[in-house]
Amino acid sequence: MEAVPEPRTLAGGGRGSRRGWMKTLFEEIKASIKNNYNQDRSFWRPVLPWGGVFTIKAGRKAVSCTPLYVEIRLKNTCTIDGFLMLLYVILNENENFPRELSLHFGREFVDCFLYLMDTYSFTTVKLLWIWDKMEKQQYKSEVHKASLVIDLFGNEHDNFTKNLENLMSTIQESYCSNWRCPTRVQEDQQRTISINPPQEIPHGNLIRLAVDELFCSKIELCEERGCGGLREFSQRVFCHGAPPFVVLNMQHWKPEDLAYVPYYLDLSDHKYLLEGATLFNKEEHHYSAAFQIDGHWMHYDGLRNVNLILLNKPPEFLLLSSLVYIRATEK
């Protein structure tokens, strides 16, 4: 088994500084939006490019294994790239979000993540996520010649959403009216928010209807065999309070069901605003992302040479993999 560098080693001891007087990456992106000219709508340099190579400097004791490797190569990183870009934007949207997310991810991780993004250490920030948040069985790795190759081919919800600790954990209780029901009291706890399209296509906003189906209180026939009672479901609530952001898993939805994407949702008595989305191209088996800053939409695709582009209008959400909403600021 290979030994790997600690995240704090990768960051070079610079966590928490956010480069002092220098502009952060987020400030650079906002400045590019403000100073945009129609003939050039792209950010001035690649951000989180696909893949990555981390060279182990001579004399560093971060890696020790047999056979020895002197660099780490990352492949198929689009399964985490889009979400890492969205996470960075979210952490900069509200001054309280880094503190709140530190309760789930750890302050060291949040500080290190922001520092690495702001210093354009994009391969290192991916390694931080892989080694700090992912389980070893979630990715493939092998030593090839003098390189450790880490392959993240797969599903972005497996590689990112399922590794958000208990951030989005919810619980819903239900009670059956039949006292003889063998499962009269039930609890349904979920760590992620996966909504399914309605089986019968009703009129109205399908996504909002599906969210309400998951979160709202309701009364249904008990499904326990031979019961015949009515089961009352309480409102679904977040186990650890309303999180700064939520990710809706949309991978089971068809393009024709996504004609309208709601710009806000009410979840467990809290309002959430649409911040961005991840998109999946089935032909290329490739993920990209879109997000908005100050009302301006941008498209990110780590596989392209020019990978961060300001859009003229909101993107079409026909290839949705996920929707990302941030909690609205209470006034």
Image: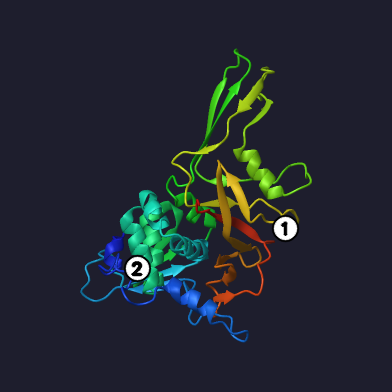
Q: Which element type, helix, strand or loop, lies under badge 1?
A: helix
Q: Is residue 258 left or right of residue 106?
A: right
| Residue at the front extreme of this rendering | 331
Report the amino acid beneath label 1.
Pro
Q: Position of residue 20 (x, y in %)?
A: 31, 73
Q: Which residue is mark 2?
A: 115
Q: Position of residue 157 (x, y in %)?
A: 53, 53
Relative image position of residue 188 (x, y in whole percent):
54, 33
- Pointer 1 or 2: first along the chain: 2
The residue that appears at 39% across and 76% down in the rendered structure is 23
Q: Amino acid at mark 2?
A: Tyr
Q: Which color scheme does this rendered protein use?
A: rainbow
Q: Identify which residue is drawn at 39% across, 51% down.
A: 100
Graded by Cα atoms within 10 Å as few (under 14), some (14 to 19) or many (20 or more), the crowding at tag 1 reads: few
**Separation (CA) of disc 1 from disc 2:** 38 Å
Between residue 282 and residue 252, name the one nearer to us.
Answer: 252
Question: Which of the labelled discs sits on residue 255, or is there none?
Answer: 1
Question: What residue do we see at 43% from left, 68% from top?
Answer: 74
Nearest to the eye among marks 1 and 2: give it: 2
Q: Quadrant of the N terminus?
A: bottom left
Residue 286 position by quadrant: bottom right
Q: Is residue 174 above or below residue 61?
A: above
Mark 2, secondary structure of its residue:
helix
Does residue 67 appear left or right of residue 256 in this picture? Answer: left
